[in-house]
Image (tube, rainbow, N blue to C red):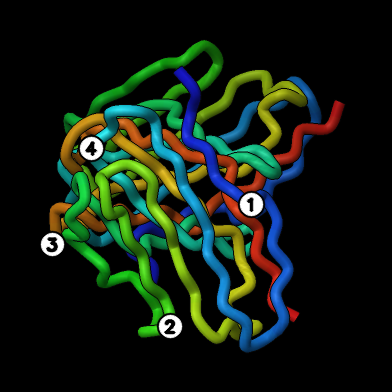
């Protein structure tokens, strides 16, 4: 059983389209992070959200933490080919202080 | 300074061989994490060090997996008697302070292990 479920698993869209990726859990987290990973590289942190209902924007990317701190979403406006990659949500285990769980991942391909 | 460095980048092993994967964290970083990542999936936690102390090894899949960080800097993940199911990318990450939820983890590019 995955602690963090992401949807969709795969997404292929045309340049200029908008998209939303979801990260859901039945657990409550004190914070949640989003990463992007490109082929052959390690994940790179995009944002950390901490407060329930929090919205953070990073250029064309908008991140939201659910009010109950169990879920999060990532919205990309006017996607570009450079946005292509594996998007991962991640959070510290609610039961231990050290285990860091990653979501199942969303593989995004933006077609020029 | 340099980022997290992992070596080798690629490793091919015959089933039953032992392998050792190296991680050089960012200098001065206290925390070090190892993850296993299957193709197209999110990384899965293996183990965590704070300085030289291995505080959590609950993610290691079997007793064939062993990790150490003897001087609190470089870490080695060793896999004994490799099996085909061990084929994956092994990622190392370091963090400047203890494993608090908001800490940023800096990842290496990983070692891709293929067991034939």
| Residue A84 picture location, percent across and down | 70, 34
First in sequence: mark 4 vs mark 2: 4
Frontmost residue, B99 versus A72: B99
**Residue at 25% from the left image edge and 42% from the top image edge:** B31
Q: Is residue A49 visible?
A: no
Marks 1 and 3 share the same chain: no
| Residue B48 picture location, percent across and down | 27, 55
Secondary structure of the residue carrying numbered label 4: loop
**Residue at 49% from the left image edge and 58% from the top image edge:** A104
> Pointer 3 and pointer 4: residues touching (CB < 8 Å)?
no
Q: CA distance from mark 1 to mark 3?
A: 34 Å
- The crowding category of the residue bearing disc 2, from other C-alpha atoms within 10 Å (few below 14, some 14 to 19, many at least 20), is few
Frontmost residue, B94 versus A6: B94
First in sequence: mark 2 vs mark 1: 1
**Residue at 25% from the left image edge and 25% from the top image edge:** A54
Which residue carries the number 4 mark?
Answer: B30
- The crowding category of the residue bearing disc 1, from other C-alpha atoms within 10 Å (few below 14, some 14 to 19, many at least 20), is some
| Residue A95 picture location, percent across and down | 13, 62
Q: CA distance from mark 2 to mark 1?
A: 20 Å
Secondary structure of the residue carrying numbered label 1: loop
- The crowding category of the residue bearing disc 3, from other C-alpha atoms within 10 Å (few below 14, some 14 to 19, many at least 20), is few
Which residue carries the number 1 mark?
Answer: B8
Q: Chain of mark 4?
A: B
Which residue carries the number 2 mark?
Answer: B64
Frontmost residue, A55 versus A40: A40
- The crowding category of the residue bearing disc 4, from other C-alpha atoms within 10 Å (few below 14, some 14 to 19, many at least 20), is some
In the rendered view, tell whether residue B83 sits above or below residue A45.
Answer: below
């Amino acid at each position: 059983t995955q602690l963090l479920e992401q949807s969709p698993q795969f997404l292929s869209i045309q340049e200029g389209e908008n998209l939303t990726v979801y990260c859901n859990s039945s657990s409550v987290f004190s914070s949640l992070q989003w990463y992007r990973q490109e082929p052959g590289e390690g994940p790179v942190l995009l944002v950390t959200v901490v407060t329930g209902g929090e919205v953070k924007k990073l250029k064309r990317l908008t991140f939201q933490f659910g009010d109950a701190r169990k879920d999060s979403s990532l919205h990309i406006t006017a996607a570009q080919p450079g946005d292509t990659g594996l998007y991962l949500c991640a959070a510290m285990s609610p039961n231990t202080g050290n285990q860091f769980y990653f979501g199942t991942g969303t593989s995004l391909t933006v077609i020029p | 300074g340099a980022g997290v460095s992992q070596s080798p980048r690629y490793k091919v092993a015959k089933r039953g061989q032992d392998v050792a994967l190296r991680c050089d964290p960012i200098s001065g970083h206290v925390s070090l994490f190892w993850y296993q990542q299957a193709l197209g999936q999110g990384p899965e936690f293996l183990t965590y060090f704070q300085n030289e102390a291995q505080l959590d090894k609950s993610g290691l899949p079997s007793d064939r997996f062993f990790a150490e960080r003897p001087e609190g800097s470089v870490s080695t993940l060793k896999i004994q008697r490799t099996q085909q199911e061990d084929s994956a990318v092994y990622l190392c990450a370091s963090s400047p302070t203890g494993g608090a939820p908001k800490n940023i983890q800096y990842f290496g590019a990983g070692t891709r292990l293929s067991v034939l």
